[in-house]
Amino acid sequence: MTRQRRFENLALTAITLLAGLIWIFPLYWAFVTSIRSENRVVSEAARLLPDELNLSSYVDALFNTSLIDWYINSIGTSVIITAVVLLTGMMCAYALSQMQFPGRRLLYGIVLASFMVPAQALVVPQFVLMNDLDLINRWGGIILPQLVVPVVIIVYKQFFDAVPKEMKEAVVLDGGGDYTLLFKVYLPLNWGITTALGIITFIMSWNAFLWPFLVVTTEDMMTIPVGITQVNDAFGVAYARIMSVALLAAAPVVIAYLIFQKRVTEAVMISSGVKG
Amino acid sequence: MAMIRNRSRHRLVAYSLILPFVAIFALVFAYPVIEVVRMSFTDAPLIGGGEWVGFDNYTRLLSDKLFYTSLVNNGYFVLLTVIPTTVIALVIALAVNRLSGRMQALALVMFFMPYVLPVSVVTQIWAWMLDFQFGILQPVIEFFTGKPVPVFKNPFWVMPAVAVVTIWWTNGFNVLLFLAGLRNIPEELYEAAKLDGATRRQLFLRVTWPLLWPVTALVLTLQLILQLKIFDQVYLLSEGGPFNSSYVLLLMVYREAFQLNNGGYAAAISLVLFLIIVVISVLQFQILRIGGKDK
């Protein structure tokens, strides 16, 4: 490599990292704001470096808002949604991939077609339905409409299709049925994609805004993304506290992402069909 | 006899496997699809039945000025986001793809991180950064315009500002798609081109760009559909204002159904959005299929 080429490469790398730092600056700024006292947030609004470690707004956020309730609601509903979506998705995908039954092609066609339907266009009848089922302001109401995630079935089916037929034989010879095959052979072979789909489903339901916003009207039943918008009204213009609440709200997904980076990357690529 | 019993057993097992999904799907998806169509022909309030009114809601829609405002704003927002985010994501993906190992992982984390944040966290942070009095970005705005601007309260600035926030938030997803596309390009092609003495620019124009086109088409169409469905950010940042300058279709659905109690009318608006998106999805499917055949 020539000297000039090497210099160019170094410069490009530096520019990329600098751009990355600028890109996450809003998060950094939210953090710096959150550890300042409310007075200094406004008086030192242009000081980029952290100059004090004041955790009072975090204390305020945790104890003077319903943040704990919102955490519980978000964790509870997201965990249930993720578990149900994965379980029903893998069962349905297994039948579509490995079994013969009348209506199979029709079902797969419907799954593919529902992929195109924007869920947001269904909020009005879904709300009426949840009202009829008496599920407004309940976990059930938050959860139910979020359980249809066709892409999980499509991805699972692709992976099940690719499992070599020989893997089946031993189980079938032992007299094992399809449930045994699914949970003892196909699922263990696809743990990787299962965790990937699980993480992305969890992040999606944790971040869902429109539906929980519509179906919940009482503060104690709100999920994190809906609940934190209430803080503005409660605190008025109090940016240190608003930023503390925002960062606490984001923490679980940010931590999950940092731990499972590779899986998240993989899941996004696979579920959008660019890699499989 | 045993064969037949076996076969019907096999079917029963298959149906038991699909049943949970099918039951949920029928209840919370298929039924609402039918209901949204039916409701759109009634004068139903949000809760409670209504009378059949034929196409009244649709004729009303055609003479509703706010409907056209919303349509235009939806289109404007698509213009402000789709192509810019695609270009930005491509540039970032190319830059990140050159890096290797930990350096690449670090760069990717920085560019992808906003995508995992809840939308309201994103809007809170940007509302603070763009705060009229104390926002850290106001000096930047002042540098270009000569004075600070309350961006979310200004009819001219509101949509571009929401677009910037949206691109910052969702761009990481597109970066990943481009990265996957770049990784799918066989290294040998570059080696061969380099042996022939190709410059960096030629490598990009002759190898990378043509092979990346299917991913680019995918990103463009996914973004188009996603950005048509905008609600969260405008609701949280500007509530459609000022003077309806950021009013969009889903906001109209929300207001008609949940604030003005016009369920039937809201269903009709939903159905229009629904149809626009289905048509685009079908077109996308066709385009991608043709693209796939070319390969």
Image (cartoon, rainbow, N blue to C red):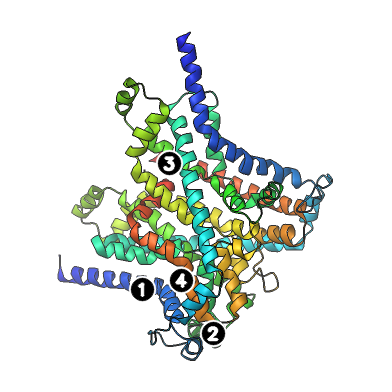
Can you give x and y, in whole percent of width and height, for residue A96 in the image? 47, 31
Q: Quadrant of the N terminus of chain A?
A: bottom left
Q: Residue at x 43, y 31 (%)?
A: A97
Q: CA gap, disc 4 to disc 1?
A: 18 Å
State the residue position of label 3. A155
x and y, in percent, of residue A90 in the image: 44, 38
Residue type, numbered disc 3: Val
| The C terminus of chain A sits in image quarter | top left
Label 2 residue SS: helix
Q: Which mark is residue B128?
A: none
Which residue lies under the disc numbered 1? A21
Q: Residues within 10 Å of mark 4 (few under 14, many from 20)?
A: many
Along the polypeptide, which appears first: circle 4 or circle 1? 1
Tag count: 4
The kind of residue tagged 2 is Thr
Work out whether disc 2 and disc 1 sit on a shared chain: no
Decide: few, some or many residues near mark 1? Use Cα within 10 Å; few <14, some 14-19, many ≥20: some
- Against B7, residue A127 (above or below) is below
Instruction: Kindly tell me whether residue B209 is visible in this rendering.
Output: no
**Distance from label 4 to label 3 (Cα)?**
32 Å
Secondary structure of the residue carrying tag 4 is helix
